[in-house]
Image (cartoon, rainbow, N blue to C red):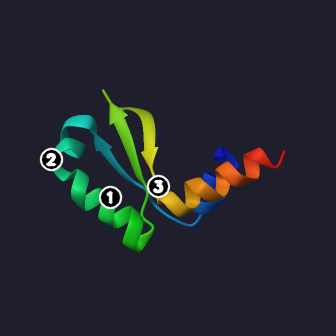
Amino acid sequence: MYQVYREYHADMDATRMGTRELRDNLGHRIDAAHFRGEPTVITHNGEPRAVLIPYAAWAQGDREDKGK
């Protein structure tokens, strides 16, 4: 699954956002992921902790993982 994200993300600059900022902008970041394919790197104390990506990209990776 992570390989799919790396390939998906290779041509994009991800928005980085702390957890508090994300809480205030979650709806906008979900729309950005879904409608524009924009990933968001979620940080905690400046350290990357998670990535919000479009569901389709995640689902594609999940299918590929199950095929291994």
Query: Cβ–Cβ below 8 Å for labels 2 and 1?
Result: no
Q: Quadrant of the C terminus?
A: top right
Q: Which residue is mark 2?
A: 24
Q: Is residue 26 left or right of residue 41?
A: left
Tell me if residue 26 can be seen: yes
The disc label shown at residue 30, or none: 1
Query: Cβ–Cβ below 8 Å for labels 3 and 1?
Result: no
Q: Residue at x 47, y 60 (%)?
A: 54
The mark nearer the N terminus, 3 or 2, is 2
Mark 3 crowdedness (10 Å alpha carbons): few <14, some 14-19, many ≥20: many
The mark nearer the N terminus, 3 or 1, is 1
x then y, percent, for residue 32: 34, 65
The answer to which image quadrant residue 19 occupies is top left
The disc label shown at residue 53, or none: 3
Q: Residue at x 30, y 45 (%)?
A: 17
Circle 1 SS class: helix
Q: Amino acid at mark 3?
A: Ile
Distance between the alpha carbons at the discs numbered 3 and 2: 18 Å
